[in-house]
Every structure is written in C-alpha cells, then in structure tokens.
C-alpha cells in the first residue's frame, strides 16, 4: 500500500483528463492523475503511483532504479502488482 | 542498467561507508531513526547495518501505518462491516491485522463481506454496482495515501453517490515525530526522513525538529546509496555543529510538496483532536477525520462505532519496537509465537513493518557471526 510504484503514462483518456492509462512492469491499468493538475503528465512521462493515484512526476532514471528495487523485494511488490491488475479505476 | 548501477554501485557504497566511519567522533555513538517502512525494507534487504561503523545504529520508527493502527480501530471497522448490507473495502495490507476477535480475513471467512481493493477508487466502482448495499472504505495511511481518500470522497460527492463512505484512519507524520522526541525513553541523534510522505507535505513541516529539538533530518530516497548518503549528511551536520532539514531525495521530493494534494486534503479532511496509535498511545492532532461538509461520506457519523480502547496482547512488544526501544529480534515472541503467517503484533503483519522486514531479510544475518556481506546488487 505504501509502496510507490513507477508507471509510464501511455495515454490520457480523451473524455477524462484526470484518468491516464499507465504501464507498470507490463501491467496496463487506469490511474487517477488529478493530483498532478499543476503539471499534468503526457504520454511517455513517468509517474510515481500510490494506491491508484499519481503523486509526482519522476524521471526515467529514477523510475528504472525504483522498478529494479521493487522487483527485488519479492512478495510485497508481487502483491502490489496483483492488486493493481485487479483494480478497475474510472 | 546504467541508471540502476548509479544507485547501487558497491564501490560507491564502500567509499561512502568509509566516509561515514571517518565522520564518527571517537568514543561517541550515534542513533538515527528512519520513519518510513520502505526505508526499513531497504535497510534489512541490503544489510545496510553491516556497512555502518559500530558507532552508528539505526532505529526503526513508526513508519508503517498498518502497524500503528490500534486494535480498537480494527474492532470498530469490524463493527461497521457487520452491519446489515455493508460491504467493507480495504487495502490488502490491512486484511491480516489482528483485532480482538480476529482479522478481516477471519471475518471474511465467517461470511462478513470485506473486499480487498488496490485503490479507494475501486470502492466507488463497487458502490455504483451495488446501489442497494452500503460500501465503506477502510481508509488508512500517512500523507502518501490521504490525498487519494480525499479525492475519492470529493468524486463520490460530485457523482451524488449515496451509498459510499470512508472510515477514516489517516494519520500524520509530524505529531508522531514530536511524540517520539518528547518520549523520555528515546535517544535519537537525527532522522532519516520519509521519502514518499514528503512528496506530499514537502520539507518545511520538519523545520520544528532542528528548531525545537536540536536534531537534524534528511529526507531520503529508497535505494541503499540514498540511505547511506542520508546518514552521511546527518553525520556531517553533527560534525559541523549544524542542525537542519536537508533533502537528499530532490529527484522526487519538491521542497513545497504537492500543493494540489495538500489542497484536496484540506478541503475534505480536518485534523482530529485526539487519536490512539499502537505503541505510542494517544497523540493530539495526529490524525484526520472527515469534515462536516462531507459528513454524508463519513462512516463514523453514519455507523457510530463503539470506539472502545483495547489493550494489545501482553506478549506483544510492538510498542517498544515502534519507538526504537528494542530491536525486532529482542521481542520475546519474535519468530516463535509471532511470524508473518501468524502475527500477534501489527509490526509482523505488513511487509513494511519492522518485524516482518527483519524476519524476511534479517534473521539469518543477525545470527551470522561472519564478516559483513557485500552490498546486495540484486
């Protein structure tokens, strides 16, 4: 729950500017980007995601390092990814 | 993976370790508290304590929100979940936290409808799909998850959803740090400040720590080198006679935090005059509740749970672990009566809890008597 997971923004929903599709370790899901209203992300940007919300923009180097760290911690990240996969945000 | 190597490089880690040792004054011991469960995870997974001189010790603070939820609040949640027509939703981390009559998982097995969700927004979808039921989201977490709950409530209000509410257990880091610093048992020379909480609140809320308590704080990232560098910055401040808030994690944390997140929290939630923390007791103004304006979405107003205070099991020493008085392995039930599969105390429940992290990564290292291991590059 408290793990911040990096995701790459793939698409902003045309009808809902507060919802983006992100790719997290190959899992594609909708997240809310309303907390980044001051500087909304664009496709190709990386964001730090907590419980389905983008909390900050991050650079690709940070994202890749964080992903590498997370995949190394085992079950906690597996559980987080499974939860993300099961989520259905709109 | 050039990027990763920059954060993990074992040679850099060795050089940093040597510089850390060089900053320690002879005959002086240093204790630094990390207040984020993610940091605890990194420290144990990579055996960072093996890379620090004996004079420097790390104290694992109350950085896991699941770990500091008192049993009484779990019981209150269960009271709500058992009302007619209720669907309780909860983050997965919460499911195994013991209340006085078992956990959410136990209640689920007995027929209470408690569903795991990844996001509070998933609860909205459940509420829309079940208009004849009342969906209650068990909201927990520090400032990393608080804006998500606040934005979800705002969205539910905008949609006019009448069957959704939150049982708000959000807590705030600053009063907890103050409570730790006020505790007579605790000796802390400085803090490794939380990375993700600080993306929301920024660095300024920590200014009282150097100003009022004379201790430095360095907001830190989660890589092993981030934490070593933060410890180095803390020691350098102490050596130079400085005492400040520094931001090691500038690549993610802005000094002012996230103003949009802070605004939505302030719109929907307000500080709660009093809240009990497991292990720390009652701390004034240390948690959030739903504002009057959004009372229709406040499960506490709707269901009026009993709010009884429940003592932790006598065998459990989570409180002493959370305040850094003892290390996880010094608890009398660690690894015997209390394991991640059958937790007695909350610190063993969440993967970010100090006891679970130590159990999963640290036990073998602690018992080993051989030389310090290489910094893991996995």
Image (cartoon, rainbow, N blue to C red):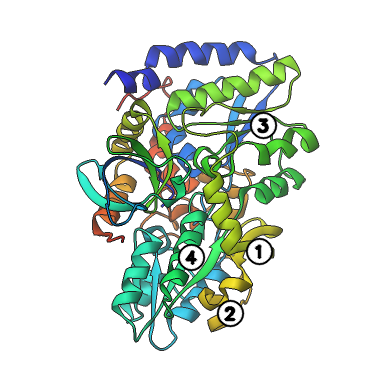
Quadrant position of the N terminus of chain B in the picture: top left
Q: Earlier in the sequence, mark 4 or mark 3?
A: 4
Secondary element type, mark 4: helix
Where is residue B153 shown, x and y percent of the image?
48, 66
First of labels 4, 2 by sequence position? 4
Residue for badge 2: B301
Q: Residues within 10 Å of mark 3 (few under 14, many from 20)?
A: many
Please report the residue visible at 44 percent of the width from the left and 80 percent of the height from the top.
Answer: B162
Lower position in the chain sequence, tag 2 or tag 3: 3
- The residue labelled by disc 3 is B190
* N-term mark: 3 or 1: 3
Q: Secondary structure at mark 1?
A: strand
Q: Position of residue B118 (x, y in %)?
A: 34, 58
Residue drawn at point x = 31 percent, y = 30 percent: A64
How much space separates mark 2 and mark 3, taking CA atoms?
40 Å
Which SS class for mark 2?
helix
Mark 2 vs mark 3, foreground winner is 2
């Amino acid at each position: 729950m408290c793990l911040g997971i990096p995701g790459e923004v793939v698409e902003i929903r045309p009808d809902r500017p507060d919802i983006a599709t992100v790719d997290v370790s190959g899992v594609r899901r909708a997240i809310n980007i309303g907390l980044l209203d001051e500087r909304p992300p664009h496709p190709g940007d990386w964001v730090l995601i907590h419980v389905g919300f983008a909390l900050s923009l991050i650079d690709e180097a940070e994202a890749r390092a964080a992903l590498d760290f997370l995949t190394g911690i085992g079950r906690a990240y597996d559980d987080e990814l499974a939860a993300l996969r099961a989520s259905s945000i709109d | 993976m050039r990027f990763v190597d920059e954060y993990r490089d074992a040679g850099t880690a060795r050089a940093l370790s040597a510089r850390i040792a060089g900053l320690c004054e002879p005959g002086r011991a240093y204790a630094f508290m990390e207040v984020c469960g993610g940091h605890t995870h990194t420290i144990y997974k990579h055996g960072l304590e093996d890379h620090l001189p004996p004079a420097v010790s790390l104290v694992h603070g109350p950085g896991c929100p699941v770990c500091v939820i008192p049993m009484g609040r779990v019981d209150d949640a269960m009271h709500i979940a058992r009302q007619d027509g209720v669907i309780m939703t909860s983050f997965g981390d919460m499911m195994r936290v013991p209340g006085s009559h078992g956990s959410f998982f136990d209640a689920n097995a007995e027929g209470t409808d408690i569903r795991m969700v990844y996001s509070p927004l998933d609860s909205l979808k459940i509420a829309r799909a079940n208009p004849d039921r009342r969906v209650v989201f068990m909201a927990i977490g520090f400032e990393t998850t608080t804006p998500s709950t606040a934005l979800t409530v705002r969205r539910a209000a905008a949609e006019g959803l009448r069957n959704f509410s939150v049982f708000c257990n959000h807590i705030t880091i600053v009063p907890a740090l103050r409570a730790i610093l006020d505790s007579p048992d605790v000796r802390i020379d400085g803090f490794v400040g939380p990375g993700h909480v600080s993306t929301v609140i920024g660095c300024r809320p920590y200014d009282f720590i150097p100003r009022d308590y004379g201790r430095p704080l360095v907001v830190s990232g989660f890589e092993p080198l981030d934490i070593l560098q933060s410890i180095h910055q803390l020691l350098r401040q102490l050596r130079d006679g400085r005492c400040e808030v520094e931001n090691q994690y500038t690549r993610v944390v802005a000094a002012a935090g996230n103003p949009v997140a802070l605004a939505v929290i302030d719109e929907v939630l307000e500080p709660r005059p009093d809240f009990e923390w497991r292990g720390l007791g009652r701390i004034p103004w240390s948690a959030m509740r739903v504002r009057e304006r959004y009372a229709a979405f406040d499960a506490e107003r709707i269901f009026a749970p009993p709010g009884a205070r429940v003592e932790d099991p006598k065998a459990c020493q989570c409180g002493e672990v959370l305040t850094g008085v003892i290390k996880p392995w010094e608890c009398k039930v660690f690894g015997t009566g209390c394991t991640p599969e059958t937790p007695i105390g909350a610190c063993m429940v969440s993967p970010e809890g100090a006891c679970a992290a130590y159990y999963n990564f640290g036990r073998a290292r602690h018992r080993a008597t051989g030389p310090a291991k290489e910094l893991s590059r996995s």
